[in-house]
Amino acid sequence: MSKEQPNHPTETRRPLGAAGAAENSGHEEKAECGVATDLWIELLVYPDAKKIQRRLYLRVAEEWRWWYDDDPFVFQSVQSAFCNCTDSLEVVVWYYDDDDRIVGLVVRSKYSLTERDGGA
């Protein structure tokens, strides 16, 4: 994992949850997609931040991108994929290339059942 920390965004943006992310994105273009390689979770909100929710940062396509939603299930699922199940799970992220905000993410298995079971 990279030792470089993400830059904390200085501007405040409207929170986007999983529901409504597509409707609120304001983009007409197709979102980019990639697998996250590094993880950074705010445990507490930065003191100088003018926001009330923590952020989840993921490095995708060599850039730090952030998810702005305080849902504990999302944080737990992503953290488990990185910390407990790195051999079998990965985090896939959707984002717009001109924006560092994540508009969607999933935790999924790296292998299909046939690949994992040796092709049987």
Image (cartoon, helix red, strand yellow):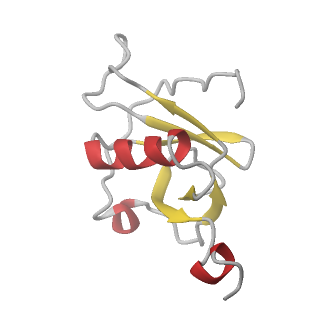
* Any part of residue 45 in sight: yes
Q: Quadrant of residue 69?
A: top left
Q: Is residue 71 visible?
A: no
Relative to residue 111, is residue 14 drawn left or right? left
- The front one of 54 and 100 is 54
**Residue 87 at what x, y percent from top left?**
63, 53
Q: Position of residue 47 (x, y in %)?
A: 34, 10
Q: Residue at x 36, y 23 (%)?
A: 43
Name the residue nearer the viewer: 109 or 52.
109
Q: Is residue 81 above or below residue 25?
A: above
Residue shown at 34%/30% (left/top)?
54
Establish if 111 lies above or below 89.
below
In the rendered image, the residue lying farthest to the bottom is 120
Count of labels in the image: 0
Residue 11 x %, y %: 45, 29
Residue 72 quadrant: top left
Q: Is residue 86 left or right of residue 74?
A: right
Quadrant that contains the N terminus: top right
